[in-house]
């Protein structure tokens, strides 16, 4: 296991809490930021960076909630990581977008 990827074994309560927070922030970002901005550089570069840095990005709940996807049912059991650590955090990324445009 890579040090960047702490295995968390997400339980249902944690999964729902993190998913809810990311979905709420994503909706707020979309409602307050010009969609052209959202779909351009900031989001695309962030997602690309996550995919390059974390080869198992499909196993991160935060990634799927950010891009609005659902993991395949077969991968649901392997969904062991919550949000990315540190500067790669999806919650912090979305909050930074809101802070740049004013909440």
Image (tube, rainbow, N blue to C red):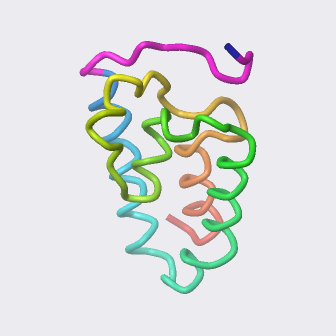
Specify the principal SS of the magenta part: loop
Q: Which image quarter holds the N terminus?
A: top right
Q: Residue 73, how many percent across, how many down?
A: 26, 38
Compared to residue 83, the image places residue 103 above or below, namely below
What is the magenta range? 2-13
How many numbered markers are drawn?
0
Q: Residue at x 55, y 62 (%)?
A: 98
Q: Nearer the viewer, residue 24 or 16?
A: 16
Q: Residue at x 32, y 31 (%)?
A: 76
Quick check: is 59 in the magenta stretch? no
Q: Is residue 5 left or right of residue 58?
A: right
- Image-quadrant location for residue 38: bottom right
Q: Residue 26, how many percent across, how many down?
A: 41, 59
Q: Residue at x 57, y 40 (%)?
A: 57
Q: Is residue 101 left or right of residue 61?
A: right
Quick check: is 10 in the magenta stretch? yes
Compared to residue 40, the image places residue 51 above or below, namely above
Q: Residue 39, how many percent across, how many down?
A: 55, 77
- Image-quadrant location for residue 85: top right
- Image-quadrant location for residue 46: bottom right
Q: Nearer the viewer, residue 68 or 71?
A: 71
Q: Residue 64, how many percent across, how many down?
A: 42, 48
Q: Nearer the viewer, residue 75 or 8?
A: 75
Compared to residue 6, the image places residue 49 above or below, namely below
Q: Nearer the viewer, residue 101 or 41?
A: 41
Q: Is residue 31 left or right of residue 51?
A: left
């Amino acid at each position: 296991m890579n040090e960047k990827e702490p295995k968390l074994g997400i339980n249902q309560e944690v999964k729902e809490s993190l998913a809810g927070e990311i979905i709420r922030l994503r909706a707020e970002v979309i409602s307050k930021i010009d969609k052209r901005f959202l779909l351009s550089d900031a989001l695309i570069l962030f997602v690309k960076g996550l995919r390059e840095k974390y080869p198992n990005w499909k196993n991160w709940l935060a990634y799927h909630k950010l891009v609005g996807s659902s993991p395949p049912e077969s991968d649901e059991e392997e969904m062991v990581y919550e949000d990315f650590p540190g500067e790669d955090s999806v919650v912090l990324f979305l909050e930074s977008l809101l802070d740049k445009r004013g909440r």
